[in-house]
């Protein structure tokens, strides 16, 4: 029996909170323009190491939003759908769930128009801003579609905030790694590979994997999220034939390492590093049974094989306290492997070299990667401990997973899209909110302009239309067309 599969693509016109549908009739009679902005307002809930955080927020993700949602999704699920079908589908949803007789004429007019009559002005993607600086503005371009600006708020907010959060956290990690590279004499170019994206399986679906995997790639090369590399080529004009977008290495997992049981683990490691991957970097998960035995006994017995390889064997601890596993546990028995930590254990077997600043780096034939429950705080502590032990920062690679990239909300950057100006009966009105119960939610007012002053982005509000036309916010999308594109290379030039 032949099976068919329903292709499900969410309807763009339905990507709203229900209350958005009622706002068109609630605005004052004679309204012809609604002007809004998206601003990250604060970082008090951002998962960073506060003492090392520069306080800035990375702007990233708008171009992906425009291409995937405002252009592709609106075209395939609304504008290119026969009008009677598109309108009937939305009307049915309102009739069966909103419990009111909704006037569909506005939606019908939008479908007749055939494009989104909005203008988006934005800062360049990859720049870093202080809280309170708008990163993009949205306004309708035709008076009858004043309602559309904030009708889109739900989708625009949902599509942008997490990419900005994770691009910010990736940049923060990169800053920590660069700091310790400079302090301990490690090569700074290694930092681009020292943070590796392990987050895919812990994120909320396929789209979350690649869209937020791209955020990691704004500051790093290392990634196991294949779709993020695809997306960078499709959405940010990257080209893997001409540049490094992202990369990884062959690696084992526990299903591989446990297949031959406890007794067969050492021989399995030998076969993998000698027969299956005789050259290049290969990562071996090492905690399936007894990590300390693997990192000492097996590593010693396989030393000749490891040294003879044209490449590096990277051992991966995958459980326990990362700081103690890598740097040693001072509560353990003095002189034990646990007390020494993984770096010292490998150093005793394979030796080290001393760099120009006097810090030790493991023999290039071996290395370590830790990818379980890493956070900026733990990464900082590990590198600080290694420094105090006399080891350079390039002795460890961090797998950055969902413990970092999934533990966030819109409140992590206080991201909000709010209207600050409107036109009613030909009169421009500055609008704002200033709740007495939460001063952090106070908004700018009127038309907005962003300028650079002393190397920092600053906000000027209550601007005239002539003033608003100036400044660093540039038109990137207008009337259904993406007018200005940016590339991954440009973004990385701003961040890396």
Image: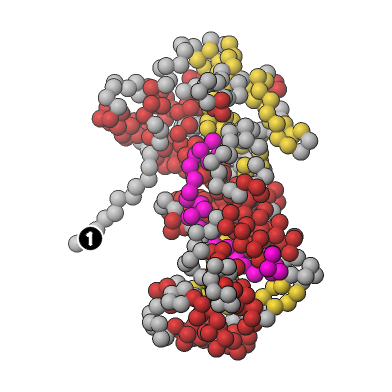
Badge 1 is on which residue? 2
| Residue 190 visible in rendering | no
- Say how the picture is coloured: secondary structure
Q: Is residue 282 magenta?
A: no
User: Residue 106's quadrant in the figure?
Assistant: top left
| 429 lies above or below 368 | above
State the residue in front, 198 or 371: 371
Residue depicted at 53% across the width and 71% down the height: 332
- Please identify the residue farthest to the left as the structure is shown: 1
Which residue range is magenta in the image?
388-414
| 312 lies above or below 327 | below
- Residue 307 x, y percent position in the rendering: 63, 85
- Residue 377 x, y percent position in the rendering: 58, 54
Residue depicted at 62% across the width and 83% down the height: 349
Image quarter where the N terminus lies is: bottom left
In the rendered structure, the answer to whether residue 495 lies left or right of residue 356 reads left
State the residue in front, 85 or 386: 386
- Residue 139 x, y percent position in the rendering: 56, 26
């Amino acid at each position: 029996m032949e099976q068919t599969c329903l292709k499900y693509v969410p309807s763009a016109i339905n990507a709203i909170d229900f209350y958005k549908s009622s706002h068109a009739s609630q605005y004052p009679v004679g309204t012809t323009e609604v002007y809004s902005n998206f601003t990250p307002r604060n970082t008090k809930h951002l998962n960073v190491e506060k003492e090392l955080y520069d306080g800035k927020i990375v702007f990233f993700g708008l171009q992906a939003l425009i291409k995937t949602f405002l252009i592709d999704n609106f075209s395939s699920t609304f504008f290119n759908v026969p009008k009677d079908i598109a309108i009937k589908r939305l009307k049915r949803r309102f009739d069966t769930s909103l419990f009111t007789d909704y006037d569909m004429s506005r939606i019908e007019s939008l479908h007749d128009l055939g494009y989104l009559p909005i203008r988006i002005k934005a800062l360049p993607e990859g720049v870093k801003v202080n809280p309170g600086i708008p990163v993009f503005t949205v306004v309708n371009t035709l008076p009858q579609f004043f309602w559309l600006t904030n009708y889109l708020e739900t989708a625009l907010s949902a599509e942008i905030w997490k990419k900005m959060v994770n691009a910010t956290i990736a940049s923060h990690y990169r800053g920590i790694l660069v700091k310790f590279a400079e302090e301990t004499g490690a090569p700074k170019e290694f930092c681009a590979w020292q943070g590796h994206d392990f987050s895919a399986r812990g994120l909320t679906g396929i789209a979350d994997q690649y869209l937020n995997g791209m955020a990691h790639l704004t500051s790093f090369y290392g990634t196991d999220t294949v779709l993020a590399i695809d997306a960078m080529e499709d959405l940010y004009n990257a080209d893997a034939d001409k540049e490094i977008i992202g990369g990884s290495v062959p690696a084992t997992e526990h299903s591989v390492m446990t297949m031959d049981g406890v007794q067969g683990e050492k021989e399995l490691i030998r076969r993998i590093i000698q027969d299956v991957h005789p050259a290049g970097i290969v990562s071996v998960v090492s905690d399936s049974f007894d990590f300390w035995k693997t990192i000492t006994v097996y590593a010693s017995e396989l030393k000749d094989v490891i040294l003879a390889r044209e490449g590096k064997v990277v051992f991966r601890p995958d459980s326990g306290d990362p700081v103690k596993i890598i740097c040693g546990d001072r509560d353990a028995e003095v002189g034990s492997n646990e007390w020494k930590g993984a770096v010292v254990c490998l150093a005793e077997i394979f030796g080290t070299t001393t760099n120009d600043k006097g810090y030790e780096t493991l023999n290039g034939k071996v290395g370590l990667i830790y990818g379980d429950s890493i956070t900026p705080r733990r990464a900082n502590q590990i590198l600080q401990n290694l420094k105090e032990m006399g080891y350079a920062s390039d002795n460890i690679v961090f797998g950055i997973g969902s413990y970092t990239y999934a533990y966030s909300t819109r409140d992590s950057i206080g991201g909000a899209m709010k209207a600050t100006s409107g036109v009613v009966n030909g009169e421009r009105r500055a609008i704002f909110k200033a709740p007495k119960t939460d001063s952090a939610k106070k908004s700018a007012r009127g038309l907005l302009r962003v300028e650079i002053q002393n190397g920092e982005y600053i906000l000027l509000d209550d601007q005239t239309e002539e003033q608003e036309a100036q400044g660093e916010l540039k038109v990137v999308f207008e009337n259904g067309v993406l007018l200005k594109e940016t590339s991954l290379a440009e973004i990385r030039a701003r961040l890396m």
